[in-house]
Image (spheres, rainbow, N blue to C red):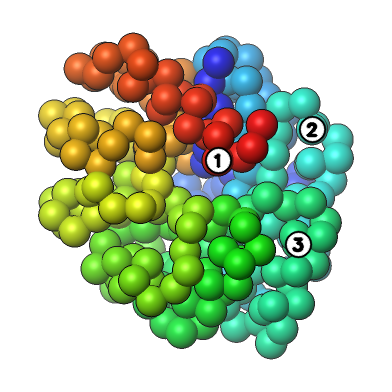
């Protein structure tokens, strides 16, 4: 079994323009067509049982439309896809929106400080993390450099540590193995702490020995397999992790056991 904890899909009417724009900004060609059918085809080829879909609300007015699309995914593809909800830090009613998402059955939320234009250690995020944790929701956050956006980095390991220290964060997931391209800081500041790292978009970018070292220092119970599909291949990332010097039990935890425990499935 394999669970991919970090994927993206777009509504059909938006997918062409969205994928083209993101390809141009990042210089990274998409590995699928960006639609649900493309993700399902990738999952079948790679042997992925379930993918977590992470929507990004880039403006408060998008809350309703994006979460309606996310809810439709959960309703129609409940056997193989789980979409989190999205919320923007500038929401005028963050508690009401989080409670709405919880009541609608969303098990987690996605935050993207770079695309939302707010530093992760801002009070607006801290209060979202605190209340979402009170609701027992998973909080998935883009961490580190975003390859498609200029500096500054909006979620560094130091910022994440501040948020963790000042909120009731319980199920916090830092994407891109704690902070894309900031892995020395991740190793120094975050390894071993009570936070999850996902493996999204590290294949081909992260030194394998450093990955192995951080997994051992951080604890195999707190690492989640993830790809950032369509920006990284599911099969390729599985192969990359399988080639790492990790024992079979550690790989099973990374590929699905940790995700199942966190998701409660």
Give the position of the N terminus as an image quadrant.
Answer: top right
Left/right of residue 109 with respect to residue 237 in the rendered view: right
Residue 132, located in which quarter of the rendered image? bottom right
Q: Earlier in the sequence, mark 1 or mark 3?
A: 3
Relative to 108, is 114 above or below? below
Left/right of residue 46 with respect to residue 38 in the rendered view: left
Residue of label 1: 262
The percent position of residue 223, horizontal first and vertical second, equals 38, 37
Q: Earlier in the sequence, mark 2 or mark 3?
A: 2
The percent position of residue 131, horizontal first and vertical second, equals 60, 72
The percent position of residue 48, horizontal first and vertical second, equals 57, 20
Q: Are marks 1 and 3 in contact (CB under 8 Å)?
A: no
Residue 121, located in which quarter of the rendered image? bottom left
Residue of label 2: 78
- Viewer can see residue 143: yes
Judge the density around disc 2: few (<14), some (14-19), many (≥20) Cα neighbours within 10 Å.
few
Relative to 259, is 142 above or below? below
């Amino acid at each position: 079994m394999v669970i991919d904890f970090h994927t993206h899909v777009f509504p059909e009417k938006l997918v062409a323009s969205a994928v083209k724009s993101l390809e141009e900004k990042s210089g990274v060609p998409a590995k699928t067509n960006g639609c649900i059918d493309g993700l399902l085809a990738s999952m079948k080829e790679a042997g992925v049982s379930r993918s977590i879909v992470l929507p990004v609300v880039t403006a408060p007015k998008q809350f309703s439309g994006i979460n309606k699309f996310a809810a439709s995914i959960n309703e129609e593809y409940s056997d193989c896809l789980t979409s989190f909800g999205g919320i923007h830090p500038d929401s005028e009613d963050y508690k009401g929106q989080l409670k709405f998402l919880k009541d609608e059955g969303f098990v987690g939320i996605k935050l993207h400080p770079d695309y939302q234009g707010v530093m992760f250690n801002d009070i607006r995020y801290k209060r979202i993390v605190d209340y979402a944790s009170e609701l027992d929701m998973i909080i998935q956050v883009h961490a580190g450099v975003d390859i498609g956006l200029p500096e500054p980095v909006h979620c560094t390991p130091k910022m994440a540590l501040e948020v963790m220290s000042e909120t009731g964060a319980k199920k916090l997931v830092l994407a891109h193995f704690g902070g894309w391209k900031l892995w020395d800081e991740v190793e120094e500041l975050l390894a071993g702490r009570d936070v999850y790292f996902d493996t999204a978009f590290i294949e081909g970018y992260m030194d394998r020995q450093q990955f192995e070292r951080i997994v051992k220092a951080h604890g195999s119970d707190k690492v989640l397999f993830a790809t950032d599909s369509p920006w990284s291949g599911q099969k390729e990332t599985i192969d990359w992790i399988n080639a790492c010097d990790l024992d079979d039990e550690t790989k099973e935890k990374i590929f699905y056991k940790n995700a199942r425990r966190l998701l409660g499935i």
